[in-house]
Image (cartoon, rainbow, N blue to C red):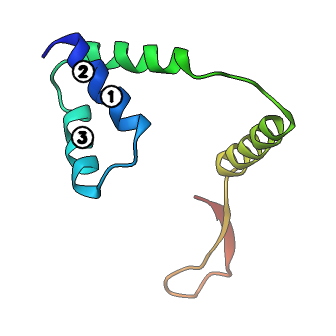
Amino acid sequence: MANKTIHTLITKFFGNDLPDAIQMSFRKWFVGGTHQQEKEEAMRELWEQVPAEADGRTVQELYRLHHRMEAVARPVARLCISRFFELPPYYCYL
C-alpha cells in the first residue's frame, strides 16, 4: 500500500465522523500487522499538524491525570478474612 494512501486513510478517519461499521473496519486495519512503519509515520505527521497550546484547562486536566495515576499506583488495603473464620480478620495489600 502506498504511503500516500495510508496517510489519506488516517487523515480522513480522524478528520470525519464515520459510521460504526467503517470505524470498526479502520480499527482492524490500523492495528493489523502490515505497513506498521508507514502507519506510524502518517500518525506522526498528523500529530505534528495539530496545534498545541497549553492553557489553564490543560494544566487542570494534567493535574487530574496525575491524581488518578497516583491513586492507581497506591496499594489498596482490603479486608482479608480467613476462610474458616478461625483467625481474626486482617488487612492485606492486593
Relative depth, front residue between 9 and 28? 9
Are the residues flagged by discs 1 and 2 in contact, CB closer than 8 Å? Answer: yes
Amino acid on which disc 2 is placed? Ile
Q: Which image quadrant is residue 62 in?
A: top right
Are the residues flagged by discs 3 and 1 in contact, CB closer than 8 Å? Answer: no
Q: Position of residue 47 (x, y in %)?
A: 51, 20
Give the residue at x 71% y 43%: 65
Instruction: Give the CA distance from mark 3 to mark 1.
Output: 9 Å
As drawn, 63 above or below 44: below
Label 1 sits on residue = 10
Q: Position of residue 9 (x, y in %)?
A: 27, 28
Label at residue 26: 3
Image position of 73 (left or right of 83): right
Q: Position of residue 2 (x, y in %)?
A: 16, 12
| Mark 3 Cα-neighbour bin, 10 Å: few <14, some 14–19, many ≥20 | some
Instruction: Give the CA distance from mark 1 to mark 2.
Output: 6 Å
| Mark 1 Cα-neighbour bin, 10 Å: few <14, some 14–19, many ≥20 | some
Instruction: Give the CA distance from mark 2 to mark 3.
Output: 11 Å
Q: Quadrant of the C terminus?
A: bottom right
Image position of 64 (left or right of 83): right
Q: Which image quadrant is residue 27 in?
A: top left
